[in-house]
Amino acid sequence: MKRKLLIAVLLVFCTIYPIFANSAWLTIGATFFIFSLVALSQDIVLGRAGVYDMGHAIYFGMGGYIFAILVTKLGMNFFAAAFAAVFLPALLALAVVTPVIHLRGDYFLVVSIGLNFIFTQILNNNPFRLTGGPNGIFGIFPAPFMGINFSSSVFIYYFAFIVITLTIAIMNNFDNSRYGRAFYFIYQDDLAAASMGINASYLKQIGFMMSAVLAGFAGVLYALEYSAVSPETFSVDQSITFFAIVIVGGQGSLPGVLLGTFAMFVLPELFRGFADVRYLIFGIAMVAMMVMRPRGLMPTKYGFYPKKLFGGDT
Amino acid sequence: MDIFSQQLINGLTYGSLLGFIALGYTMVYGILNLINFAHGDMVTLAAFLAITIAPLAVAAGTLAMIITLAAVVVSVCIIAILLEKIAYKPLRAAPRLSLIVSALGAGMVIKNAIMLIWGANPRIFPRNLFPAGLAKFSDISVSYLSVIILLLNILVMLTLYIFINKTRVGIAIKALSTDYSVAELMGVNVNNTVMIVFLIGGGVGALGGMLIGASYTTVTFSMGFDYGIKAFIAAILGGIGSIPGAMFGGLLLGLTYTFCSGYVSSAWANTVTYLLLIILLIFRPNGLFGRSLVQKV
């Protein structure tokens, strides 16, 4: 009951937020939603499928760049470009991940860092003059449709808000579905899951595609919000940040991941004067958090088992 | 002097430098199954400590070099042990990913501490730490520094190889990396052995950091991650946990990277290097010299 009340208060707050927020804080709000979306998508791969992916900014970046290229170079309308930018990353994720999905945890981690380096190098090298090199692509303004200005910050805020709310609702249901339970078993022990007849590699690929769709969507929102994309937004450092958010927040925990994103992207806005020591403090906080709460800020409780099965001690 | 031999020497130098760093990764990973993400930043710290200590030690005359080297190596070793005690030891029983995030956090702390102390701009590494000049071999000239790096590489590898295989502590390290819990049950002192591993990794890494500074003349606070990740890849290429493997992996990576920048394009050298790793891992998941691991249930 308390939880429902909290969710209702948060929903109402987020809905009326644009009324009293100035433009800077509106941007911060939308940015929070966008980065939360990426963090949640990272959590599908890391906290549910249990794949150590430290290159998640790739799919975020693909969404942003595909959208930007289609809008600025080909003059596509918003819907076609957004559709492509949401679903192409999923196909590319499948193509990239399939050959390496069987690798053991840490090896996959290093491979994914390598992939992220390759991705940013491609963006920087500006192949076929598509990606704009180190400066990226700017001036991403899709043509208005039926009086909707896609670049207005209020529109983007509500758009991102709706997407994140739907995502959270879907993920909440997903955890309790057949696939969600299969993911949970893979996460616990993929060998044991495989011997029970769960196709671990196939499910991991599905997880990657799902998360690439979400990350691609976040990329579209990011490109709209800032009307520019550049390689450093999608660098390995950014991937590491998302990785850390999921682990610090608690793997598979929706509120934990949201809190982690809040701490990483919104709190620094409140303490602008300390910008220099920001990452020093984050580093200390990461170590302290892991030492004190190794399972994260808000660890998941897998509530879908009847307690009597375990004698009530879980 | 032709381009090929120049590239060969550059590649061997770069590869040896990566090998120095890779040793720390491979030894720690062998025992704790931890990618010590803070290691690359410790290497950077060594280079910056040398910048501060070298001018102080000049007063001591020709001994300056040895005093600086020793002081830097000792301080980095102390910091490596502190790092292990503070950030890793409380997490030995924790989930693996927590340990990784702790390592990332520790690396972030070291990197930003360097930035706050020494500034965000690149700094020039003292020239007088290592002998300058060129050695002539018929028509090929090699800088003394490259010769020193290559010789040190071989020396360190041989010393460590003998240390691991012939001494009591070395055998304890081997036992722990073969089977952690059985070795513990057999009475191997885990805490001391892990400390020694961090000591060796930190010391060799510190040496590598100073040699990097001397070879490339400038150092930046953020260079640790790039060197670190390349060195870890070198360790994987050679087979993680293997000391000669780390050195050979370093050389392989260094040569690939250098020849790519020389003959193909420096803008794509990283891409080729990482593709090499990915392709190798697809076909030989345990590296070139690694023993094949049977997954235990």
Image (cartoon, coloured by chain):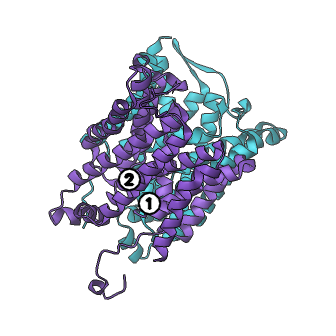
Chain colours: A purple, B cyan
Instruction: For mark 2, name the chain.
Output: A
Instruction: For mark 1, name the chain.
Output: B
Quadrant in the picture for residue A66? top left
Say whether residue B237 is left or right of residue A185: right
Instruction: Examine the rendering and report whether any part of residue B107 can be seen.
Output: no
Classify mark 1: residues with Cα within 10 Å, few (<14), some (14-19) or many (20+): many
Q: Are marks 2 and 1 in contact (CB under 8 Å)?
A: yes
Q: Quadrant of the N terminus of chain A?
A: bottom left
Q: Position of residue A273 (x, y in %)?
A: 75, 48
Classify mark 2: residues with Cα within 10 Å, few (<14), some (14-19) or many (20+): many
Identified by mark 1, the residue type is Leu
A20 shown above or below A121: below
A288 shown above or below B264: below
Number of the label disc, if any, that sits on residue A52: 2
Instruction: Examine the rendering and report whether any part of residue B13 can be seen.
Output: yes
Outermost residue, left side = A197
Q: Position of residue B39 (x, y in %)?
A: 55, 50
Number of the label disc, if any, that sits on residue B97: 1
B53 shown above or below B90: above
Q: Position of residue B116 (x, y in %)?
A: 73, 46
Q: Position of residue A108 (x, y in %)?
A: 35, 48
In front of the other: A162 or B160: A162
Q: Quadrant of the C terminus of chain A?
A: bottom left
SS for tag 2?
Answer: loop
In front of the other: A145 or A204: A145
Residue drawn at (59%, 49%) of the image = A18
Residue drawn at (26%, 84%) of the image = A309
A50 shown above or below A295: above
SS for tag 1?
Answer: helix
Identified by mark 2, the residue type is Tyr
